[in-house]
Image (cartoon, helix red, strand yellow):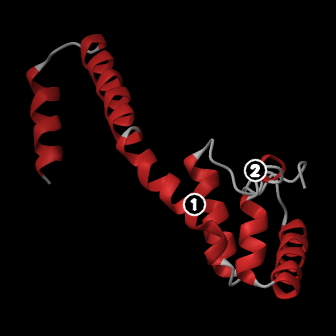
């Protein structure tokens, strides 16, 4: 299980079907509560980091959506909590990056009144 990376880039529809069948069979065999407890076991959890990724919010959302779509959304409760904590940092970093991009763009352009008026008219539309 350690080699499986559940995200949009590293999986195909066939590999996602394999993961779906595997996890649905395990959930049916063990029961969802016992299966969820096994997945959270400190010995097993490190081997499942690719299936329940926390390093990239996009991959985390993909995993949550995948398990929800196959009827096993209960397995992703910890991922959902993890994802709630992440957005507080990322939008600020994104705004800072956009602000630095726009300031570098405006400093490289000549400050003519025609470009300023077109910028203000397009932003008010």
Q: Quadrant of residue 109?
A: top left
Q: Residues within 10 Å of mark 1 (few under 14, many from 20)?
A: some
Residue 75, percent across and down? Answer: 66, 71
Inter-mark Cα distance, 1 to 2: 14 Å
Q: Give the side of residue 119 with respect to residue 13, left or right.
A: left
Q: Which residue is mark 1?
A: 78
Residue 70, percent across and down? Answer: 72, 82
Q: Give the side of residue 112 with respect to residue 67, left or right.
A: left
Q: Quadrant of residue 102?
A: top left
Residue 15, percent across and down? Answer: 89, 66
Q: Quadrant of residue 60?
A: bottom right
| 77 relative to 47, above or below | below
Q: Which residue is mark 2?
A: 42
Tell me the number on the disc at residue 112: none
Residue located at (86% from left, 75% from top): 17
| 71 relative to 64, above or below | below
Q: Give the side of residue 27 with respect to residue 70, left or right.
A: right
């Amino acid at each position: 299980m350690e080699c499986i990376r559940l995200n949009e880039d590293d999986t195909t529809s066939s590999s996602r079907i394999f993961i779906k069948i595997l996890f649905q069979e395990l959930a049916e065999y063990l029961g969802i509560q016992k299966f969820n407890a096994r997945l959270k076991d400190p010995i097993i959890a490190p081997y499942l980091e690719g299936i329940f990724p926390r390093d990239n919010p996009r991959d985390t959302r993909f995993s949550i959506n995948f398990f929800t779509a196959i009827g096993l959304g209960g397995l992703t409760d910890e991922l959902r909590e993890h994802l709630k904590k992440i957005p507080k940092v990322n939008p600020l970093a994104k705004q800072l990056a956009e602000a630095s991009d726009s300031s570098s763009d405006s400093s490289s352009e000549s400050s003519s009144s025609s470009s300023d008026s077109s910028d203000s008219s397009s932003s008010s539309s």
